[in-house]
Amino acid sequence: MHRLPFNQQQEHTMLGDYSSINDHLDTARKHADQAETEAKPELYREAVDELVAAIRLLMRNSDEKDS
């Protein structure tokens, strides 16, 4: 199996993650809007969960790692 050099692997992963991050952020906004307009406060929790997922994807691609 042909493997890409590390920097190309990282770039490929980040491009795929960009789409996922965008999806999580869009979903979070929709949940928050729906929670507000339809008086469904439980959807705020769903919005928070989507934001956490997006942040975790960003952290995974960060050069800074926990020691």
Image (cartoon, rainbow, N blue to C red):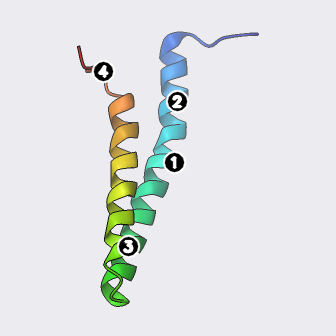
Q: The residue under label 4 is which amino acid type? A: Asp
What residue would you read off at disc 3?
43
Q: Which mark is residue 13?
A: 2
Q: Which mark is residue 19?
A: 1
Is 38 or 2 nearer to us in this picture? 38
Q: What is the quadrant of residue 16 in the picture? A: top right
What residue would you read off at disc 4?
63
Q: The residue under label 3 is which amino acid type? A: Leu
Horizontal and vertical percent for residue 47? 36, 64
The single residue placed furthest to the right in the displayed view is 1
- For marks 2 and 3, give the CA distance: 30 Å
Considering only order in the chain, which callout, 3 or 2, is on the residue closer to the N terminus?
2
Residues at badges 2 and 4 in contact (C-beta under 8 Å)? no
- For marks 3 and 4, give the CA distance: 33 Å
Q: Secondary structure at mark 4?
A: loop
- For marks 1 and 4, give the CA distance: 19 Å
Considering only order in the chain, which callout, 2 or 1, is on the residue closer to the N terminus?
2
Horizontal and vertical percent for residue 44? 32, 70
Q: Which mark is residue 37?
A: none
Q: Is residue 29 above or below residue 20?
A: below
Considering only order in the chain, which callout, 4 or 1, is on the residue closer to the N terminus?
1
For residue 52, side relative to residue 17 (left or right):
left
Horizontal and vertical percent for residue 6? 51, 12
Residue at 50 percent of width and 47 percent of height: 20
Residues at badges 2 and 3 in contact (C-beta under 8 Å)? no
Is 44 or 8 nearer to us in this picture? 44
Residues at badges 1 and 2 in contact (C-beta under 8 Å)? no
Q: Secondary structure at mark 3?
A: helix
Q: What is the quadrant of residue 33 in the picture? A: bottom left
Considering only order in the chain, which callout, 1 or 3, is on the residue closer to the N terminus?
1
